[in-house]
Image: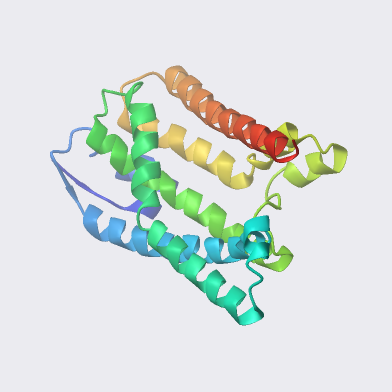
């Protein structure tokens, strides 16, 4: 049996496209899709790093260099190029790490098939970042809370770093990623729906919890 990789149909109609993945011996169309994904990732992360450059150039080390306006622009472009190059590597790191995390709970699917599923899900991450880029560029900051989530509302109530960071992760794209993960696993795994739901929510929750703690510790260190 063969499985043909169809990212969009896989995300929106998994029951129609993933029925062959569980028993498939060969997977077609993956190389082309991964090349397109890498190109999109390079563009998105290149723009993200370019926007980040403005903040990085305000760091004490950069300020001491007393760069001219032209030098700052050149530095921003170089940082953006570095981000574009990094965007070719990051998908493998993110997809690989998430595959390893889920493989411990879904060995019935197999590592290779899980990797394909996580590639589908990485598309949602890219869309989420790309959707925020115009707002980041407008405000000149990559630390702004996504307007597509509850972060700005929590920020209006409290300035607590942990709470604002945690809530900042809860966006429509996070919910979409969570939902899509459950649907893809239901179509690919022999595990029960309750097991899939519990593991998926648990891993997603653990992920944003760890990142929120790390960000809180970073700000505490930064403020002495």
Q: Where is residue 45 in the image (x, y as percent from the top left)?
A: 48, 60
Q: In which quarter of the image is residue 115?
A: top left
Q: Is residue 63 left or right of residue 85?
A: right
Which quadrant: the C terminus?
Answer: top right
Which quadrant: the N terminus?
Answer: top left
Residue 9 visible to the viewer: no
User: Image point 48% across, 54% down: which residue?
Assistant: 126
Q: Where is residue 124 in the image (x, y as percent from the top left)?
A: 48, 49
From the viewer's side, name the closer residue of 152 and 193.
Answer: 152
Q: Is residue 83 left or right of residue 159?
A: left
Q: Where is residue 173 in the image (x, y as percent from the top left)?
A: 57, 46
Give the total of numbered labels: 0
Q: What sort of colour scheme is used for the picture? A: rainbow
Q: Quadrant of residue 104?
A: top left
Q: Position of residue 55 (x, y in %)?
A: 66, 60
Q: In which quarter of the image is residue 36?
A: bottom left
User: Image point 43% across, 18% down: which residue?
Assistant: 195
Residue 154 visible to the viewer: yes
User: Image point 30% across, 35% down: which residue?
Assistant: 114
Q: Can you name the residue that lies furthest to the bottom here?
A: 70
Q: Is residue 24 left or right of residue 62?
A: left
From the viewer's side, name the closer residue of 99 and 140.
Answer: 140
User: Image point 26% across, 37% down: which residue?
Assistant: 113
Residue 64, relative to residue 199: is it above or below? below
Residue 152, relative to residue 130: is it above or below? above
Residue 155, relative to residue 187: is it above or below? below
């Amino acid at each position: 049996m063969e499985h043909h990789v169809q990212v969009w149909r896989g995300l929106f109609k998994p029951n129609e496209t993933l029925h062959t993945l569980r028993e498939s011996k060969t997977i077609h169309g993956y190389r082309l899709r991964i090349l397109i994904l890498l190109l999109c990732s390079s563009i998105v992360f290149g723009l993200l790093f370019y926007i980040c450059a403005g903040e990085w150039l305000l760091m004490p080390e950069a300020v001491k260099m007393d760069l001219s306006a032209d030098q700052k622009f050149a530095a921003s472009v170089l940082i953006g190029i570095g981000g574009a190059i990094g965007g070719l590597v990051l998908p493998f790191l993110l997809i690989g790490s998430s595959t390893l995390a889920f493989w411990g709970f879904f060995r019935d699917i197999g590592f290779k098939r899980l990797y394909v599923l996580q590639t589908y899900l990485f598309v949602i991450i890219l869309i989420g970042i790309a959707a925020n880029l115009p707002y980041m560029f407008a405000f000149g900051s990559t630390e702004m809370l996504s307007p597509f989530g509850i972060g700005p509302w929590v920020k209006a109530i409290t300035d607590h770093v942990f709470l604002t960071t945690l809530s900042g992760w809860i966006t429509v794209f996070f919910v979409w990623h969570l939902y899509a993960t459950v649907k893809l696993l239901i179509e690919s795994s022999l595990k029960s729906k309750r097991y899939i739901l519990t593991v998926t929510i648990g891993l997603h929750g653990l992920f944003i919890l760890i990142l929120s703690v790390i960000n809180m510790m970073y700000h505490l260190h930064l403020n002495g």
